[in-house]
Image (cartoon, helix red, strand yellow):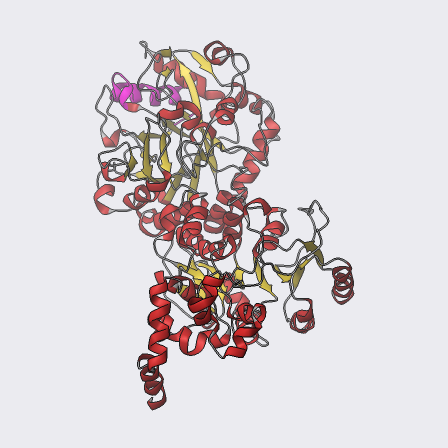
Amino acid sequence: MLRRLQKAVRTLVLRPSEWAYLWQAKTSGMFDATFYRGANPALHPFYRLFPLHHFILLGEGAGMQPNPEFSPESYLRLNPDVAESGMRPFRHFLSRGRKEGRLTRTAAVDRFPDCPEQVLRFDPHRKRAPVAVVVHVYYPDLWAEFYARLKALEIDYDLYITVTWRGAETDGLAAEISADFPKSTIVPVANKGRDILPFVTLLNAGAFDGYRAVCKIHTKKSPHRNDGAKWRQHLIDGILPPEGLAAKLDGFLTDADAGFWVADGQHFKGAQWWGSNREKTVMLLRRLELDGAADDLSFPAGSMYWVKPLMLGMIRALRLDSTVFEAETGQVDGTLAHAFERAIGGLALAAGMAVRQSSEIGRKAVARQLAKPNYTSAFYLPQFHPIAENDAWWGAGYTEWRAALGAQSMYPGHLQPMLPADLGYYDLRAPEVMGQQAELAVQAGIDAFCVYHYWFDGKRVLETPLDNLLKRPDVAFPFYLCWANESWRRNWDGLSGEVLLDQSYCEGFEDGLVKSTLPYMRDDRYQRPDGTRPRFVIYRPEDMPDPVRNIERMRKAWRQAGIGEVELGAVSFHVKGKSEVAQDLFDFWVEMPPHGLVKGEDFLYGGPLGNQMGGSTPADGFGGLIYDYNAVARRSVKPAYRRQLPNNTIAGIMPGWDNTARRGPKAHIAHGANPASFRQWLRSVQEHRLNDSYRGELFINAWNEWAEKAVLEPSETFGRLYLDVLKETLRDG
């Protein structure tokens, strides 16, 4: 204690010459305290309060830089007379060197030959170990240390190694590594993006698909620190301990809320860790509409960690490549790589996942009580095939793929267009496509598709997919129907604009509607969630002229047709229709976000609070509405909102909502919708809503509403992440 007190006193009570130096450095404006703290994250909290004192007493002698452009070691090397003068390098520069135009650091880092270009491809069906370890080797002289560490690992893993390309020297090292680890994947890379770009390059190529977790390490020396080797060993020991790794790894894998695992002391929290990186971090997170995720800085420091698949997928969605990383000039802070280190903490925050330190792995904690739904449905749009009506209204061959392809980004970071991946631009006239969709859905834990049924007083549209399915009993496709009974209008909202196809509810329409459902209800794939009654949902019951009489007639018609009793539900819509509907008229109601959930305070643009978008403000001419996806998610579990819902309501959730594809600059957009925030909402519904939901069910809006960006299917932007989130909760949880 006495020694610590003496150090504190020595730090604050400087000698006269040191006070003069401090005043000179401070008034020069060339000591960057923010940079200094960021470049030296291991500074003691006391020294973080007095960074210039630390630099003068200790940091300069250890080679620490006072700003990004001045290196004490380089200055002494470039100016030998300074050392001979006995003057401190930075003080010499402030006193004389600046006026004389002296160089402050080596003009360039080591020069490397151009790295041969290559196209990386990984077989998605290859045999894999449960986890992978990826090593970036910048310093070849450290390979022996890493070789010993890797050989001693007690777990089953696949090894990926990126090596900074140095020509023939790298070829020799690659041959050595290959002899040591014959099954490893070795990739030479250019000297760019530190250890981050090589990692992202492998990730973008699909190298890490299918692993339960990936461990990232690299040959860190940190020349700007005098304890670089000790720090490196601490970082690696924390995540690849010499003993007990298997148990630690199991603890990490079974901790559903753990996104990253780092060594003790490497979970950095608080604004003091920004350094010169805040602006670029915000820019990175904006790429996923996560502007607010940078507000509370929390991240895995040191760039060595274990990471879970959802975090890997979100990193991949950032769409980073070599074009966005700076050239290497010896920077110790302020680069995209440094911003990346902080941004991934924002990804974890958005998903409700944590950065765990080694000593926290395996600790028994009070787990959140998360209910699993007894039955999960997703709305399904059968629109993706041409019909005569759409040809006439929108042009020959029109399907919503044309709209989705034409969507344009309306503001910085706006995730449009959203386009399909694994299933491509499918045509639902092919039952095989529906079988592929069902396979993906069932694997993720979805029990049935609620397929829209378009019937207008005897006229059917978009019926071909299901009619073709009936001819193919071999195609697994669990489904039931939702009568989409609103009129079709040119504004796509069912509420305004020119009527294209009118729903007139002519006398006796009930018998015709019921008759149109019979072939489907008699199919073995038609769902009976309660084990007995086929299910049928009505989208807008309040639009019917006499709901009580209309429903009574429908039930009677189904009984007379031999179907028996039908489990009848309705969507809890946000706009009143022509008729009042009693809550007990239906067996259940369906909550369908965003209907009824968005309130004035949720709007980020176009609402009562004006423009809240900041750096993401839409371009001139945008006249739509933008609201906060996360605010809507939070409201969905609040008691005040829940009390407004009808009795026997099935809890609903949406992956997103954005009808830019249909309405362009007049779109309504849920800002911040992505798989991470979807996970956060889903787990909140599990915790607070499912136990009170009708039959413990969950309803998702939607499976494939591509023109409204309410999509669970694989996309170019997020891959299968939405399905992975569901699988974690509904199947694996």
Q: Is residue 434 visible?
A: yes
Comparing 523 with 161, the one in front is: 161
Residue 643 lies, with reference to residue 517, above or below; the image says: below
Decide whether residue 495 is among the magenta residues.
no
> In the visual, does 95 lie left or right of 545?
right
Comparing 432 with 691, the one in front is: 432
Residue 264 lies, with reference to residue 318, above or below; the image says: below
Which residue in the rendered view is the most extreme toward the bottom? 2
**Residue 439 % position (x, y):** 57, 38
> In the visual, does 381 lie left or right of 572?
right
Comparing 537 with 134, the one in front is: 134
Which residue in the rendered view is the most extreme toward the front? 100
Magenta highlight range: 542-564
Decide whether residue 546 is among the magenta residues.
yes
Q: Specify the quadrant of the image occupied by residue 368.
A: bottom left
**Residue 238 % position (x, y):** 52, 72
So how many labels did they put on this image?
Answer: 0
